[in-house]
Image: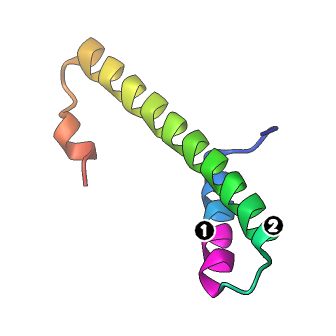
Amino acid sequence: MGKIGFEEALKRLEEIAGILEKGDTSLDEALRLFEEGMKLSAFCQKKLTEVENKIKLIVQKEGEINLEEFKS
């Protein structure tokens, strides 16, 4: 996927969703966009899991931070 950050991946994923929702692309293009979107989605999920694990480590080490504060 190259060097792309979480924010960029999320923005591109939103763009792809918008394009696909319009429904005015060819089947081949829609399939290509869907595949790209799935890769971006997996990338974002991986990044979020990494951040969650880091937060858990910080909580375990520090013992003062309440993980509930980070949940929305």
**Which residue type carries mark 2?**
Asp
| Local SS, label 2 | helix
Query: Which x, y percent locates residue 22?
Result: 64, 86
x 64%, y 63%: residue:
11
| Local SS, label 1 | helix
Which mark, residue 28?
Answer: 2
Question: Circle 1 sits on which residue?
Answer: 14
- Could one spot residue 44 in this view of the protein? yes
- Could one spot residue 8 in this view of the protein? no
Residue 57 on the magenta segment? no
Q: Earlier in the sequence, mark 1 or mark 2?
A: 1
Q: Is residue 44 above or below residue 64?
A: below
Quarter of the image for residue 15 reads bottom right
71 or 44, nearer to the observer: 44
In the image as oriented, which residue stretches furthest toward the top? 61
- The residue stretch that appears in magenta: 14-22
